[in-house]
Amino acid sequence: MYLRFSKEGNTLIIGLNGDLDHHSAEEVRNKIDDRIDRDKINKLILDFSGVTFMDSSGIGVVIGRYKKLNMRDGEVRIAEINNNVKRVFELSGLFKIIKTYNTVEEALNRA
C-alpha cells in the first residue's frame, strides 16, 4: 500500500493506493498515526479512490483513526470510495459513524 500525504490548512489528506488488508494495516496505521501526532492533526480525510481491496484489518485502521481523532474533538472523513470497498463499509456499519463524500474537495468544503 502506498500513502500520499498532503495538508489543506489544519486538515490532513491521505490518499491510499493498493490493498488495505492484514498485510498492510499495521504499517498504514503507524504512518498515519505518526503524521497525526507530528503535525497535531484533528481533521483527517482518507481518500479511498486508489484502494482496490479492503478487509476487516482495514476497518480496524479506519475505526482506530476515528477513535484517536474523536478523543481530540477531531473528525475523520472518507472520500471517493469505490463499490468493492463501499460494500465493506456498509457491512461494518462505518457509514453510521463516519461521514463520506464523493470527492476530496467536497469533504474539505463541508467544515
Image (spheres, rainbow, N blue to C red):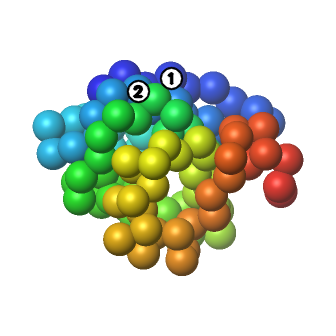
Which residue bears the numbered disc 1? 4
Which residue bears the numbered disc 2? 17
Q: Position of residue 26 (x, y in %)?
A: 22, 43
Q: Position of residue 106 (x, y in %)?
A: 79, 45
In-image side of 94 versus 27 (left or right): right
**What is the three-letter code of the residue carrying label 1?**
Arg
Q: Is residue 25 visible?
A: no
Mark 2 or 1, nearer chain start: 1
Q: Are marks 2 and 1 in contact (CB under 8 Å)?
A: yes
Q: Position of residue 13 (x, y in %)?
A: 62, 36
Callout 2 environment at 10 Å: few (<14), some (14 to 19), or many (20+)? some
Q: Quadrant of the C terminus?
A: bottom right
Taking the spot 43% from the left edge, 68% from the top edge, the residue there is: 90
Q: Name the image quarter holding residue 40.
A: top right
Taking the spot 43% from the left edge, 39% from the top edge, the residue there is: 32
Taking the spot 45% from the left edge, 48% from the top edge, the residue there is: 83
Taking the spot 54% from the left edge, 77% from the top edge, the residue there is: 96
User: Height in image: 47 above or below 50?
Assistant: below
Q: Nearer the viewer, mark 2 or mark 1?
A: 2
